Image: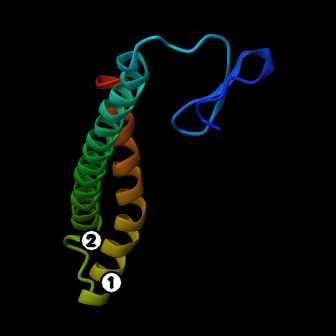
């Protein structure tokens, strides 16, 4: 039914969608949106990859902040290693998500689109 023109000017394109109106005269006009969509898809993968790298950098910053806060609070206190590990894990649970969120927000602010 792809080639038929029923009443009302409706026709079916190559993807099976029904359109109303005049058909495009040139096949290149129909191919242009597909080319644009494939470029957009590639851009989405690049943007996802950059976001993933930014989140990783933010997580590393959060881990560094956890190490720094743990050392700042517990150095010279005379506590055992279990307290150091518990403090580090606690500050990492806070620091990693905050670092990731801040890095992604900063990345979106610097490179919008």
* Distance from the alpha carbon under mark 1 to that under mark 2: 8 Å
Task: Read off the residue under disc 1.
Answer: 83
Residue at horizontal 23 percent and vertical 49 percent from the top = 53
Q: Which label sits on residue 74?
A: 2
How far across and how far down the image is residue 4, in percent? Answer: 65, 29
> Which of pointers 1 and 2 lies earlier in the amino acid sequence?
2
Residue at horizontal 28 percent and vertical 50 percent from the top = 58
Query: Counting other residues with Cα less than 10 Å from the Cα at mark 1, is it few (<14), some (14-19), or many (20 or more)?
Result: few
Q: Secondary structure at mark 2?
A: helix
Task: Name which quarter of the figure residue 36 lies in.
Answer: top left
Residue at horizontal 65 percent and vertical 38 percent from the top = 1
Q: Which of 22 and 38 lies nearest the eye of the viewer?
A: 22
Q: Which label sits on residue 109?
A: none
Residue at horizontal 35 percent and vertical 38 percent from the top = 41
Query: Counting other residues with Cα less than 10 Å from the Cα at mark 2, is it few (<14), some (14-19), or many (20 or more)?
Result: some
Q: Is residue 88 above or below residue 56?
A: below
Task: Name which quarter of the figure residue 10 lies in.
Answer: top right
Q: Are marks 1 and 2 in contact (CB under 8 Å)?
A: yes
Q: Is residue 106 visible?
A: no
Q: Is residue 11 above or below residue 101?
A: above
Q: Which of 109 and 51 lies nearest the eye of the viewer?
A: 51
Q: Is residue 81 left or right of residue 33?
A: left
């Amino acid at each position: 039914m792809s080639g038929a023109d029923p009443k009302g000017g409706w026709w079916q394109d190559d993807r099976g969608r029904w359109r109303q109106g005049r058909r495009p005269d040139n096949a290149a006009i129909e191919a242009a949106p597909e080319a644009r969509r494939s470029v957009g898809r590639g851009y989405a993968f690049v943007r996802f990859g950059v976001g993933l790298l930014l989140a990783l950098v933010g997580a590393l910053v959060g881990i560094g902040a956890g190490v720094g806060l743990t050392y700042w609070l517990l150095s010279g206190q005379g506590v055992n290693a279990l307290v150091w590990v518990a403090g580090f894990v606690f500050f990492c649970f806070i620091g990693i998500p905050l670092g990731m969120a801040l890095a992604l927000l900063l990345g979106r602010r610097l490179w919008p689109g």
